[in-house]
Image: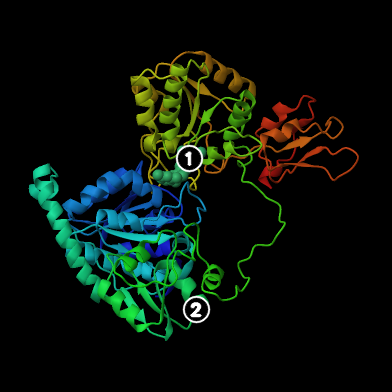
Amino acid sequence: MKKIISGNEAIALGFGDSGGVFASGYPGTPSTETLEEVARLGQVYCEWAPNEKVALESAIGGSIAGGRSLATMKHVGVNVAADALLTLTYTGVNAGLILMVADDPGMHSSQNEQDSRNYAKFAKIPMLDPADSQESYDMVRTGFEISEQFDTPVMLRTTTRISHAKGVVVPQEKIAPQVGQWVKNVPKYVMLPSFGKLRHVEVEARLLRLQEYAETTPLNRIEMRDPELGIITSGVAYQHVRESFPEASILKLGLAHPLPTRKIREFAASVKRLVVVEEMDAIFEEQVRAMGVAVEIGKNKLPLCGEINADILRTALGKEATATTVPVEGLPQRPPVFCPSCAHRGLFTILSKLKVFVSGDIGCYTLGALPPMNAMHAVIDMGASISAAHGMAKVNAIAGREEKPVAVIGDSTFFHSGMTGLMSMAYNGGNALVIIMDNRTTGMTGGQENPGTGETLQGVPVRQVEMVPLVKALGIDNVAELNTYDLKATEAAIKKGLETPGPYVLIDKNPCILRYKIRKLAMSVDQEKCTGCRACLKVACMALGLTASGEKQKVRVDPNVCNGCGVCKQMCKFDAMHELEGENYANL
Ligand SMILES: Cc1ncc(C[n+]2csc(CCOP(=O)(O)OP(=O)(O)O)c2C)c(N)n1
């Protein structure tokens, strides 16, 4: 039966329909819904791993044990899993193995916009690049076939628009999951140097066989139209090409690595002007040029940064833009802020006041870097807050600087890759204050489960990892709890952590109000008492606004937005704020 589903949902469905047995992943936009959908469909066993390396390694184990396996992650997750990937390419697979990676050109929700096609080249493995939901679905099946035929992991790469846009999918006949043999094969799976050397030779031979496959597979197709203009493209860029140049001839690369060199030459010879349209890096273009084939337009006119759209393409190729994508001028900027009553707000109100150097991390708390808080000064990658703070403290000590850095990290990020940094700090005699915002969820990506939530991906209750004993086990003696809804207590706790020499950990256990649906009585402002000093606005809450312009603007609270955390109330010196009595507007 036909369905209208997103690319992520299509991959999940394709996995269940293609004899999938085991799936593991770590959340990350735009990949997250894939594993959530596998869980919702309920056909195949799946789980959240604490990080991408664990997810891929678990999928490797699933494959070795004979089950078709899937690992899901966002592009930067592949960096975390790369150690496993770059040797997995040597071992190959037993049952089929797909690494689904979702790229984020345009950085809608990421710390960088790296192009995962580089990883396919780097690891010398095939990469499938779907252009819509149907292809996302079909390429899971094809991916498993390629994986088993060529004894290789396969990367299935989407981008934000493929992952999140919906399209029609006609499912194929379902393949029942079959678990094959659990094989002991030491030279294939034990990557000692002596075995690894032999496997590397295999990898090179496999790549040549894959290159031959690339020439004939229908994944790479020539769509011959007007020979005047020929465009080599793949993925979502194919859709933009079809929209802006419906008359152009196209070589559509469904297999983005390795490339079909003979087919490329054949296509180039059959068109007058050759253009390569790809988002982000010039991966195809460089390879085509290296073949000695002339490319008229590629990255000389098209951007290396951000997404491509129909108008960018039209302009690059000398046609007029259609103005469908030109943003309206003069709209007010609305930087994202913490949710009303989020526990992170109190923390950053105080960190901002104390003007300390904050080594931040990736999660909802990264918003603390934005105005008006401006209270985060370095954010690199997941887990870096603690290790970077450690390095800062060491250099500060060498320079004779007294200031102690503060690291801020969430629970999911701590479990992902913060723990090792903290262990290093304890082991190497570090000197930073570490604040763990343990809101018992992976908030930023939509409130997923993690080892601390006490629930699996399917919502099955399990033992929670407790933060205090974990931190102590990593070698930290000074551990205290924090309540960021209490500004005075938070300030005192942070000051104590900063004054005490050596590593010091504060743990805030207030749960994510969104994930746990916590409702509190809304606040209200006594207009008689409010002086309009705006001290409360420093907490950057979207429930707070100003009264209509008049002689003296005062603060008002939108009771439909306010969730009554009372942080703004603590900023008011005039006792103008109080909880709404009698009626809980937040529950309206
Ligand atoms: C390597 C990597 N994997 C995944 C992500 C996506 N991601 C961004 S923040 C985040 C988790 C945040 O959770 P937590 O640390 O608990 O903080 P919260 O958002 O709940 O405050 C994830 C998974 C990423 N940016 N980088």
Count neighbours of disc 2 (C-alpha within 10 A) and say few if under 14, some if 14 to 19, many if 20 or more. Answer: some
Q: Position of residue 173 (x, y in %)?
A: 29, 73
The residue closer to the viewer here, 122 or 453, is 122
Q: How is the image coloured?
A: rainbow
- Dot 2 or dot 1, earlier in sequence: 2
Which quadrant holds residue 142?
Answer: bottom left
Q: Is residue 389 above or below residue 461?
A: above
Q: Is residue 79 above or below residue 492?
A: below
- Residue under numbered circle 2: 245
* Residue 74 is at least partly visible in this image: yes
Q: As drawn, which residue projects farthest toward the right?
A: 551
Quadrant containing the N terminus in the rendered view: bottom left
- Taking the image as four quarters, which one is ligand 1 found in? top left
Look at the numbered disc 1 and say if its residue's Cβ is closer than 8 Å to ligand 1: yes
The residue closer to the viewer here, 86 or 461, is 86
- Residue under numbered circle 1: 362
**Number of marks present in the image shown:** 2
Cα distance in 3D space between marks 2 and 1: 40 Å
SS of the residue under disc 1: loop
Residue at horizontal 68%, vertical 50%?
333
Q: Name the amino acid, label 2.
A: Phe
Q: Give the side of residue 377 with respect to residue 13, left or right.
A: right
* Residue 183 is at least partly visible in this image: no
